[in-house]
Structures are given as structure tokens and as C-alpha cells.
Amino acid sequence: MLATSRAVTVIQPTITRLPSNITSINAAKRVAAYARVSTDTQEQLSSYEAQIDYYTRFINEKSGWDLVEIYTDEGISATNTKKRDGFKRMIADAIDGKIDMIITKSVSRFARNTVDTLTTVRQLKEKGVEVYFEKENIYTLDSKGELLITIMSSLAQEESRSISENVTWGQRKRFQDGKVSLPYKQFLGYEKGPDGLPKVVEDQATIVRLIYRLFLDGMTPHGIAKHLTLEGIPTPSGKQRWQSSTVDSILTNEKYKGDALLQKCFTVNFLTKRQKVNEGEVPQYYVENSHSAIISPEVHDLVQAEMKKRKALGQRYSTMGTFASKLICGDCGNFYGSKVWHSTDKYRRVIWQCNYKFKNKAKCTSPHLDEEAIKAAFVTAFNSIIDNKDAIIAGFDAIMEALTDTTAIDAESHSIQEECEVVMELIKKCVDENACTVLDQEDYERRYNALITRYEVAKERLNELSNIRQERMTKHQDMTRFL
């Protein structure tokens, strides 16, 4: 018995798979163009204007094409699309059905990020919107379009990586050479001099010196910020209201004493442009006497020591009142603070008591003190010093010599510094030897790790000595100020 032959009937489609905006052959094609330059230099701006003029004429001269708009981004990098407002607006209009075709100069003008390029092109393709890359002659609705885009956008991304690495290399080379550059528009006290180095702006330098003086007189960064705001002094960026963080940054910036710590931050990823505080991932460079100082090194170091001392107190430092942060509880070691009793009646008076008197598990037994009694005790103590000032001053030289002498510390620091240099040379020699000759790797690891440990121990001791020296120098400054 013969098998029944199979019959196949073709059922023709009745609904087109193409989006409605490209099914009409006779409808005018709505065309947009995208122009971008990555910097705002004069040369690039000329290119930017030329692109706009070119695409306006190019589209208008084509029969059957209607110009929608020339979308633009000026002075914006293409490594990602987050900050490109013109680009994002164009894509939104295309998805909303306002555009049939987008023309741009090249893949690198569109994006230097492969993922962004492919994601955007596929998103537009789903809506039937074609992108034409003029330089590469690629149409995205063409069957080979996506393969070519993948290749070209990958090349563009690698080009961006190469540019980023070259820029980073150039910056680090300048750092190694000790060349200092400041964000002058937001940096109080300096402007770029004719030789390219920071030049002191005396009007602004006066404000910097005032900030340092107020801090050493006992004011907090918050109090200094409030004082500067009330005085109507503009901030480094030209704003009227000062923040305590701005004062903090001025007080801690080594550039005000004429030195410069370079590469405090670095770019983590060339695509995202995300920056991170340098915590040892890349080299830093400290340049001494790199430019003119506004604050003497001694005053700057004294401020750093004072900040460290206030932080070590473990409690909020205050300057609200003559005796704020100067009276210490004999029980718990916290500061006394002023309190107002009977604030609304005739028995009103100001007293001082431990701020933690009722906050600790056991109530402090230290008494409260009347402000007038504190003032009287202070005057008595001060007068006793005045009466005996000659004897006190006579004995102070010997005391200062004993408490602030750094001769032994300097000698040990010099010796350890030489030790660090020798060990670093041994480490380099060890690494070079392993690179050039065949060594037993276990033996190499032991030698290398032993040298690293030796170097780290020496470096740690050097840091300890540096801190001790700084404390003694600060003590010397405090005593000199006291006298």
C-alpha cells in the first residue's frame, strides 16, 4: 500500500512585521543628525559648528527626507551616555516615533563604549529606527550592520582606553617632575602665575591667614565658617555661605605652606570616570617648597597638631564661652559646660557642670561651679603667675630644652632613613635577579618577604619618630605662645 503524499500549503502573511513608521514607501523619511565634540577648545568648537552646518545641508538636499533636528552635545566625552543630554533626548524622540533615521559622523562620535553602542542600536532597531554611520558606511538595519558596529565600537573603546592611559601617563610624569597645578577657580589664595606656578593673591591670602589664626585662637571650623559668612567674605567658589568642611580643607591643605602632595585621587575606570581617594593603590609624590607659601610650615604643623589633639579628646570641642573646653571633670574626664538656672525669673544665673554628670552609669560627684567663682579663681591663678613671672620664665628654658629636644630623634630618623634606602635597593636587586635568572622560587619568596618585612618595620618606626618629633615641636610652639 502506497503512503499518502504530504501536501504543503503556503499561507501568506496578512500583518507586516515591520514597524508602522517604515512601511509606507511614499512617506517622507524623518531624519535627524547627531553632532558632538569632546572638548570646548576653539578648534573643537569650530568642528562642532561645521558638523551642524554640514548635516543641516546634507539632509535638506535629499529628496524625500525631512529634517527633524540636529541633536548636539558640546564638550562632553563619549565614554558613557549618562551626561549627554542631547543624545538622550534624541533617543527618546526616536523611541517615541518622531524619527525614522539618525545620521552621525562615526561610531566614535556616537559612543566609545561597546555596550552602550550595541544596547542603543538594538533598542532603536526594535522601533524600526535606522542609524547611519557615515565614516564607516554602516546602516544598522543592514544584515551585516551589527557585526560591523561591534567591531568598530570595540576599536573606538580601545582608542578611548589608549587616550586615557596616555593622559594618565602624562599626569604622573608631571607629578614625578614635581610640577604643581591647582584648581585655581576654587582654590583660595592662589592664581596661575606667568611661569605656570601658583602665585599668591594677597587679598585672598589674608583670608587664609585669618582662618589659621582664628583656629589657633580656639575657634572651631564651624565657628570660623559662621564668622566668615557674617563678615560677607565669599567662599573659594564665590558663594556667600561658608561650610565647615571648606574651612577644614583649607586648614589641612599642605599647599598653603608651600608644599604639594600629588595624586591624592586617581581615576578607577576610564569608562565611568569614577575617581577614588588614593589609599596606596598608586604612587603619591610629595614636593617640598614647590611654590610660595601663605602659611609658615611651623604654623601649619601647629594647626595639624591642634586638630589631632581636639580629635583625640573624644568629645565635641566647643568655643561657646571663655571657659568652654577648658574645664575638665575630675571624675569622668569630660568637659564642663555652661548651664542656665532660673532662666525666666529674677534668680537667673549661669553655672558650669560636667556635661556627662547624668549620662554616665554612676553620677559624677564633681560639684557645679558658679561662673563668677570660676572667673575669680582664674584671676587669682593668673595673678600668681604674674607675680612670679620672672622665676617662671627663668626656669622655662631648661624645661623647654628637656621636653622638646629632638636631637636624638633626628639622629635615629636619619639612620632609619638610610636603612630604608638600602633595603629598597636590595628589594629591587632581588626582583631584577629573579627576572633575569632562573631561581628557586621558594627561596626567592623567602628572601623577598624578609626584605619587605624589614622595610615595613623600619618605615613604621620612622613614622613613629616623625609623630614624636611633631609632638615635641608642637609642645615647643605651645610653650613659646604661653610665654
Image: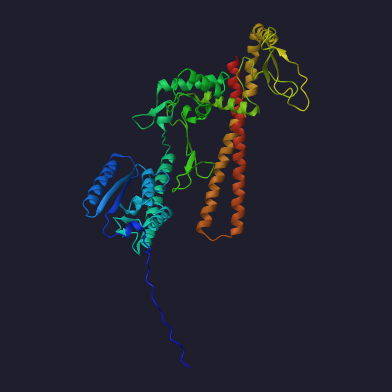
Nearer-the-camera pick, 40 or 71? 71
Identified at 39% across, 48% down, the residue is 92
Residue in the image at 49% along x and 38% along y: 264
Report if residue 151 is visible in the image. yes
Q: Residue at x 33, y 51 (%)?
A: 99
**Does 250 appear above or below 139?**
above
Q: How many marks?
A: 0
- Residue at the (49%, 18%) spot, across then down: 230
> Where 391 falls versus 431 (above or below)?
above
Pick out the residue farthest to the bottom.
1
- Is 89 located above or below residue 397 in the figure? below
Q: Quadrant of residue 142?
A: bottom left
Decide if residue 352 is on the left or right side of residue 131. right
The colour scheme applied to this rendered structure is: rainbow
Quarter-of-image position of residue 196: top left
Q: Position of residue 436 (x, y in %)?
A: 50, 58
Residue 352: x percent and y percent?
Answer: 69, 15
